[in-house]
Amino acid sequence: MKFASFCQALSNWAGSSKTFIAAIVLIIIWALTGPFFHYNDTWQLIINTSTTIITFLMVFLIQNTQNRDNDILHLKIDELIRATKDAQNATLGLDKMGTRELRKLRKHYRSLGEADEIDVESTAQ
């Protein structure tokens, strides 16, 4: 629980406009120091290493927060399905289905949607 809270807080901070501006300022400072260091390999290595490490860590942070948001969304949708009288409760177990089964179910719902479009068009006329 502490890790999830930490990741959420870090994700909120990393996605803020202040953090973006700070990153731009750091890059500008790094670029302006180029002539002082004669654009040597160490000067280039500083930005390359920094951005590589930050990118590597951000991949895991983004994946963690995306998984959490996805789980929350699924729980909310599951509750709506469960609470709706006419809903198909079979859809609550979609995460256990294989790709072929999901495609077949998608085609079924697409055909239901197309049938509903025909009904709406005929009543609108």
Image: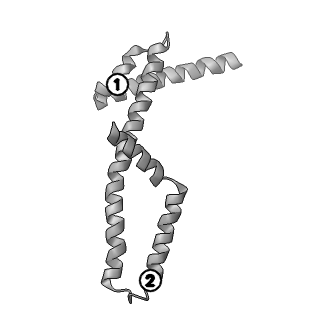
The structure's colour scheme is one colour
- The residue drawn where x is 36% and y is 49% is 61
| Local crowd size for mark 2, using a 10 Å CA cut-off: few (<14), some (14–19), many (≥20) | few
* Percent of width and height locating residue 30: 44, 77
Task: Name the amino acid, label 1.
Answer: Leu
* Percent of width and height locating residue 113: 52, 23
Residue found at the far front of this picture: 2
* Percent of width and height locating residue 118: 59, 20
- The residue drawn where x is 41% and y is 26% is 75
Q: Which residue is mark 2?
A: 33
Relative to 3, say whether 14 is above or below. Answer: below
Task: Name the amino acid, label 2.
Answer: Thr
Q: CB of mark 2 within 8 Å of CB of mark 1?
A: no
Relative to 24, say whether 12 is above or below. Answer: above
Q: Which residue is mark 1?
A: 94
Question: Which of the 4 quarters of the picture holds residue 55?
Answer: bottom left
> Which image quarter holds the N terminus?
top left
- The residue drawn where x is 30% and y is 32% is 99
Number of marks in picture: 2
Question: Which of the 4 quarters of the picture holds residue 53?
Answer: bottom left
Q: Under tag 2, what secondary structure?
A: loop
Relative to 44, say whether 69 is above or below. Answer: above
Instruction: Give the mark nearer the N terminus: 2 vs 1.
Output: 2
Mark closer to the observer (2, 1): 2
The CA distance from mark 2 to mark 1 is 55 Å
Q: Under tag 1, what secondary structure?
A: helix
Q: Nearer the viewer, residue 119 or 19?
A: 19
**Residue 116 - label:** none
Residue found at the far top of this picture: 85
Q: Nearer the viewer, residue 30 or 110?
A: 30
